[in-house]
Amino acid sequence: MSPRFLATALLLVNIAFAQDEGRQDLYYGKFQSARDFYQKAQPGGESTWWLGQAELGMKDTNAAATLYAHALAAAPNDPWALVSAGMASLLTGKATDARNQFESAISLTRGRDAGILQAIARANIDAPAGDANYAITQLNLALKRKKTAGLFTDLGDAYAKLIDGGNAVTNYNNALQTDPSYAAAHYKTGLIYETQRNPSQFVPEYEAAIAADARYAAAFYRLYVHYYYLDVDKARDYLAKYTALADPGPLVDQANVDILFAGGHYQEAVDRATALLPGTPAAFKPHYYKLLAYAEDSLGRYADARSGMDTYLGHPDDQLTPKNYLEAARIYYKGGFGADSVFAFVERAIALDTVPAQKTAYIHYAAALADSLHEPIRKAYWAGQVYLNEKEPDPADLYAWGNEIYNTAEAIRKADSATRTGASDRFYRQADSVFACYIDKFPAYAVYGYYWRARSNWSLDTDMKKGLAAPYFEKMIAMADTSKDSAKYVDAVKTGAYYLTAYYYGKKAFREALEYDNKYLLYAPDDASFRRLKDFIEKRLAQGGN
């Protein structure tokens, strides 16, 4: 072997070992270390690919895209440069260009390089514009050449992107059968179960990842996140272990500020976040704005809390949830920053949340807010939303909706009584419609439904000339009289008898007036005015009146 050939061979061996060191950092989530390593490594080719992966791990998508885009110009026939260019195309939404670049890389390697196939798959898994099915095809081709835990785990990730948890877990298990120490497969299985909100399954998987490889920092981080709201001391312990293993950097800084907040050290969290913000990479800044909003809220400084929340919502990270909008609503409510904004935030939370129970909770919260803000129109609206969003309609909720609409009409009538604009009439009609629905859906409660239909129509016909309420009061009384629970309807019957006595007396229908006068006196025998009216009507009828 010539000295020159030997030197070249040794160089290639050293590069291979170096690549392994850099990839090991990536595997353990030590992205800063990996970035530092590959920046010092021989440029171009495969090193460029891994350097870009480190940049993506650091959440610097722009740096990765720029790096990858330039790779092809430097080496247009290098398969790794083509894969890198394809990833750049995916990151900028150019899926067709990406596919052409990936196919060129496959063609140049005759589809025999498992590393190229795996990198193409990884690009399609990680990039939002990537095609998971295309990734599955490449990984299956790579697995025909060699079976590794990494390839099976990537295949699991491709299925996870397709929201196929069953096939994802199957491939993670295949990875563990290939290499029981491959902690990433346990970790990825835990992530699947965590999306299903199943701690009885995801916690053991994270613990298994640690048992398989105590250096796998990401599992400690997920356990820290899990216990963050459940057990601060336990969360703090997992965070300390994560911090000891991970690269120093923005994620570690962020988590160690978060734990101050979780422990109730709000001012210390504010001080630390404020100090870190100027030097924090842009991708990590939104989290601090959110943290500052929550901490300032806890300290009762609502103007500062609003500022933090407004900044966060204006520049959110990928951790934005419906609950963040609900927190914004609470901050605006407590700070008195405008009811319109409060309810706009609640509506946004409801629109984004996909969990029916959460939506219902937000709707109940909005109804309570409307009540506390003394806004009858909004209260009526949200009472309706409570009923309309019930999986199994509850008569009490439908009744409450109609009642709130009626009360809204009353409040409006009282407010515009001087000008008598009739603005309340629309709400009386709505109340009538809701109680008509109430009678139809829940006939067992029809007595109250007819009562409120009568009250709504009486409010639309206050001088009783049209008698809009009469048929509903008559049905209500007839049903109450034959009910085995008639005693509980006494007040409603009295009101109906009062109305019908007056209505029929005004029409000079004295027999009907006397019938309801007597009905009224059954429950109010000492009412002198109705006794006098009874005497008068009886005299008129004795004299041959109607």
Image (cartoon, helix red, strand yellow):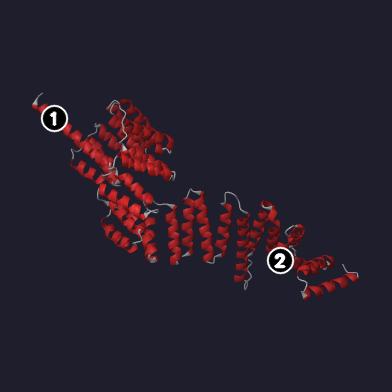
Q: Position of residue 270 (x, y in %)?
A: 32, 62
Inspect the image, locate mark 2, and give the three-letter code of the amino acid beneath it. Answer: Asp
Going from N to C along the chain, the mark reached first, 2 or 1, is: 1
Q: Which mark is residue 54?
A: none
- Residue 427 position, x and y percent, is 62, 62
Q: Residue 311: x and y, percent?
A: 36, 58
Q: Quadrant of residue 107?
A: top left
Depth order, front residue of 283/84:
283
Number of disc labels: 2
Do the CB atoms of the residues marked 2 and 1 lie less than 8 Å apart?
no
Q: Residue at x 24, y 46 (%)?
A: 32
Q: Residue furthest right?
A: 543
Q: Residues within 10 Å of mark 2 (few under 14, many from 20)?
A: few
Please, what secondary structure does the residue beneath circle 2 have? helix
Q: What amino acid does circle 1 point to?
A: Thr
Return the mark for residue 8. 1
Residue at figure coordinates x 49%, y 48% from the top left? 355
* Disc 2: which residue: 491
- Binning the other alpha carbons within 10 Å of mark 1 as few (below 14), some (14 to 19) or many (20 upward) gives few
Q: Quadrant of residue 371?
A: bottom right
In-image side of 98 versus 407 (left or right): left
* Residue 267 x, y percent position in the rendering: 33, 64
- Whether 533 is drawn above or below 282: the answer is below
> Can residue 70 be seen in this snapshot?
no
Which residue is located at x 21 percent, y 44 percent?
36
Q: Quadrant of the N terminus?
A: top left
Answer above or below: position of 24 versus 323.
Answer: above
Quarter where residue 41 is shown? top left
Residue 263 in the image: above or below residue 150: below
Q: Is residue 364 visible?
A: yes
The residues tagged by marks 2 and 1 sit, at their Cα atoms, a distance apart of 102 Å
